[in-house]
Image (tube, coloured by chain):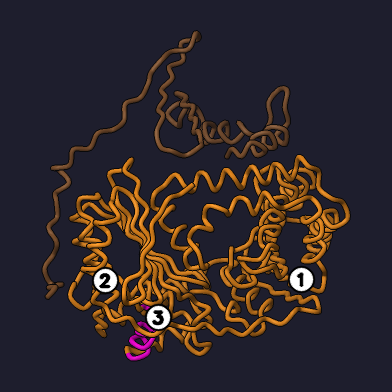
Amino acid sequence: MLDRKITPTIEEAVHFDLQLKNCDRFTLDNQVPVYAMNAGAQDVVMVEWVFDAGNWYDKQPMVAATTNFLIKNGTTSKSAYQINDFFEFHGAY
Amino acid sequence: MIQFDRFVLDNGLRVLVHEDPSTPMAVVNVMYDVGARDENPAQTGFAHLFEHLMFGGSVNIKDYDEPLQRAGGENNAYTTNDLTNYYCQLPAQNIETAFWLESDRMLSLAFSEKSLATQRKVVCEEFKEHYINKPYGDVWHKMRSLAYTVHPYRWMTIGKELSHVENAKIDDVKNFFFKHYRPVNAILVVAGNVKLEQVKRLAEKWFGPIEMGTKYERQLPVEPLQTDARKLEVEANVPLDAFVKTWHMDARLSPGYYAADLLTEILGGGAASRLYQTLVKEKQYFSSIDCYHFGSLDAGLVAVDGKLVKGVSMENAMKAVDEEIEKLKATKIETKELEKVINRTESVIAFEDMSVMSRASSIALYELLGDASMMNTEFQKYQAITIDSIHDYANKIFANTNSNTLLYHAQ
């Protein structure tokens, strides 16, 4: 007879042997470091660009956040609509 | 292509197993075939109240969260108008803890007066915080009761009235539980670093002894075809004028559902969508505007909602919205726009499938809809949508007689 008052044995998390997958690392000609990892079976790609440009560098409040917001709001050669439409067409978000 | 195996226990519990050895985790997902649409109109909010009570202790286990956390797990749940879903994720080595916890609350809750009193208060506060005190908080209460006259989608999952939850008695709660939370009305999905044989053994051991219960036969009133435009104007202490407009759309498994889904993408999906580009960026009538639907299993609603820029008249703003809708009815969309919304949909499906937790809940949802393998053919249904079917569907649903408008004026 099943005794539901008895807790199944719990293996403590400290005993787990968890290995993170290794990533490839290389440097572009302009010295930008790139880290890449091929993981999972899904047919998707995720790209992140990390800049040394956070709140730490703000000379006035909100400048970093506002600059970030403007990234998708037009460049010297493309309007906000063109940029958004391009990325949305390719299913990127 | 998501692989899974399926078996049914003698008590009617459907079990689906999705093996994914690439993760060290396991997910245990229990979906109950009960949502706010199954509530008695005089006792609304019960399905959601239950979501809270399910964490107030079960018949043999005083506290759900503590042992789960000790096993390295986390959990949550949600209630919709259609269904209730409970899920937890933990290291695969400790999966039996999840079977122990989930099966005990399916066996029976503790039904303590203290837990009911606590959760009643929590839910009442949630009602007040989000739907009474919050600016625009009552919009969907008003919209649902405007758009639906008989179908239980006319109330929200939080409940129609605060008093229904305030007056909930322990016997009402027990009856609701033993009517809906039985193995025969539930779907168990186990996913991640697990093996079919292991899941079979654990499911038999922990869920097998639970009494089957009676299969719930859903018989909901069908909403009659709307034949006249409906409109409601309210005034409240909110910062900006706002509106919501809805149109009735088809049920989840109808071909019309997929056309409606793509229409909401054309109008409101992303910063290059029609409504945002025209009404926020170019005309600057709105500070925000969205178009969406709820993925309802019965016939649902397509909604457009927006907040007006201060100084813009409601009349001009609504005229501009109607013009965009009329454009969609008058002129067929270009191939490129159709490709774009289908690409976006493919991307959403692919990204959703990345997480094992979200794969588990999708398998459960499609099983609830009748066949879990529909998960793998879902995208084909979008690919079958053509420029003409989008055009026909836009003309079908965006008829004025099918519309409900709520104008929300700032005092």
What amino acid is found at the position of numbered circle 3 in the picture? His
* Residue picked out by circle 1: B403
Separation (CA) of disc 2 from disc 3 = 16 Å
- Secondary structure under tag 3 reads helix
* Residue closest to the far right: B330
Amino acid type of the residue that numbered disc 2 sits on in the rendered structure: Phe
Judged from the image, the secondary structure of the residue bearing numbered disc 2 is loop
Viewer-side residue, B158 vs A65:
B158
Mark 1 Cα-neighbour bin, 10 Å: few <14, some 14–19, many ≥20: many
Q: Amino acid at mark 1?
A: Ser
Quadrant in the picture for residue B156: bottom right
Image-based side of B375 in relation to B195, left or right: right
The reply to whether the magenta stretch includes residue B178 is yes
Task: Choose between B350 and B13: the one closer to the eye.
Answer: B13
Task: Report the mark closest to the observer, 3 or 1.
Answer: 3
- Residues at marks 3 and 1 on the same chain: yes
Dot 2 crowding, Cα within 10 Å, few <14, some 14–19, many 20+:
many
| Left or right for B332, reference B404 | right
Query: Is residue B228 found left or right of B385 in the rendered image?
Result: right
Give residue B207's mark. Answer: 2
